[in-house]
Amino acid sequence: MLPHRLQVSQTAPGPVDLTLPGTAATISSVTRRARRLAIGAWAAGTIAAGAAGGAVFFQLTAPTAVARAADALHGNAVWPGGHATPGFSLTDQNGHRFSLASQRGRIVIVTFLDSHCTQLCPIEAQELRAVDDRLRPSQRPVIVAISINPQDTPASVRRFVKRARWSGPWYWLMGSQRTLAPVWRAFGIEVVTLHEKINGVTVTSIGHSTAVYLLDRRGHERAGYSVPVLPARVAEDVRTLERPA
């Protein structure tokens, strides 16, 4: 397990208990899953939305200590000097195998999205576009979206990205439940599938926690952000990591 990962525990339904936006967390230990960080989401006090419009709530366990990062990044959690990112290989929207190691030398944003979602995921996608809009084309990070819905397809993700109008390079990684679940766990992302009968029709909803991770040119995690993010601060952090060491 990776160090410095904060637990997200599921409740259905329940409140979202979060630290203040814009603070950075230095985390020593929390609960039995203390070595995983899921930065969680703030949007309207909920985390997640399914394709059918259902929602699942999660409660975020607050960090035990809060302090500004030594390298002045603005994440809700920061790792001065960085630490290793989980290793994995998944299939992208073009049918090619993709690993984060292939992006060494570039600034990368990693996040978790559902192309069928009509609630929070489109909001986050617009925020990521706003990050790109604040940067010159040569500065724009590579966006790596890891699917939380095994029903995502190349066609559905291209429609989603077209609506979001991402202007920088991006990859959307897809797979089965079996191949995606270990990646979710490695990043501390919780995914719950609910089946509910409405007027005799079974409706499936996917609930998930989410986070945005910023990786430096070495492929190390440097900051993690709760969603919704503040695009101006993420863009500033990208510029910080673009500067020569």
Image (spheres, rainbow, N blue to C red):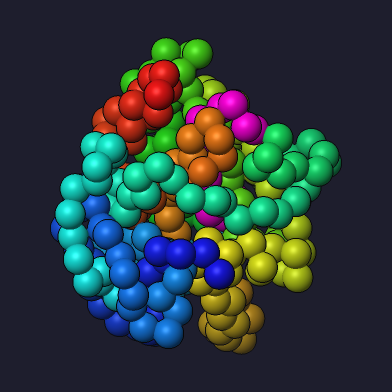
* x 58%, y 76%: residue: 193
- Residue 45 part of the magenta segment: no
Which quadrant would residue 106 be assigned to in this image? top right
Residues 115 and 143: in front is: 143
Residue 130 position, x and y percent, is 37, 29
- Quarter of the image with the N terminus is bottom right
* x 81%, y 43%: residue: 97
Residues 3 and 106: in front is: 3
Residue 165 appears left or right of 176? left
Image: magenta residue range: 103-115
* x 41%, y 19%: residue: 244
- Residue 113 part of the magenta segment: yes
Residues 195 and 66: in front is: 66
**Is residue 219 visible to the viewer in this orientation of the structure?**
yes
Residues 115 and 167: in front is: 167
Look at the picture and state if 23 lies above or below 125: below
* x 51%, y 71%: residue: 190
**Is residue 230 visible to the viewer in this orientation of the structure?**
no
Residue 88 appears left or right of 243? right
Look at the picture and state if 35 lies above or below 42: below
